[in-house]
Amino acid sequence: RRFTSITHPDDRPLGEAAYHRLLEAREATDACFDRRYLRADGTIVWTQVTSRLHRGDDGEPRYFLTHVEDISERREAARRVEDLATLLGTAEGLAHIGSWSHDPQNHTITRSEEIHRIFGTTAESFPPTFEGYLALIHPEDRDAVRDAFRRSREPQRAPFESRHRIRRQNDGETRYVY
């Protein structure tokens, strides 16, 4: 039985193209892609296929060594995370509440779409750093916000709580946020 007989029809061209690229390219030896296979009962199993083309001393293809890993659960978990992120975004928009998180290793901030609406920014105009955030804080409130942030990073980890003013980037309007 050939792999094409159990490969989802929509994924057959992907796998065939990858194998042909390996056969035609002298320097490429590996291919990795996601592919669906059909079980005997007709259900779909998602896999990650990794293939390596082994060539002989003369450079001619000898055989493929292929590893197929079932990633169905991983893909389902990723889908659930996407669904929850969409749901959270909808709830934030309805409540006009934004969220953000700070990565201390990279000194970056990840913001929700609602944060951009509240601050009148876009992802491009709002640097993903705490300094980028501080730039939007009313100048008279920056020290207090900086202190609250510093306390939240101390070993006892006080929650980051701060009621302060911001200046929206797109229209200059001053707003209070908590």
Image (cartoon, rainbow, N blue to C red):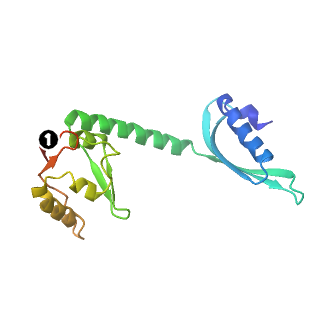
Q: Which residue is mark 1?
A: 173
In the image shown, does 21 or 84 lie closer to the viewer?
21
Please state the horizontal and vertical placement of residue 153, each as a whole percent of the image: 25, 66
In the shown orientation, is residue 67 left or right of residue 79? right
The picture quadrant where one finds residue 7 is top right
Please state the horizontal and vertical placement of residue 120, each as a whole percent of the image: 23, 40
Q: Is residue 99 above or below residue 148?
A: above
Q: Residue at x 29, y 34 (%)?
A: 90
Assign the N terminus to one quadrant of the image.
Answer: top right
In the image shown, does 117 or 97 lie closer to the viewer?
117
Please state the horizontal and vertical placement of residue 16, each as a whole percent of the image: 74, 37
Amino acid type, callout 1: Glu
How many marks the image carries: the answer is 1
Q: Residue at x 31, y 46 (%)?
A: 125
In the shown orientation, is residue 8 left or right of residue 93? right
> Dot 1: what SS?
loop
Q: Is residue 127 above or below residue 117?
A: below
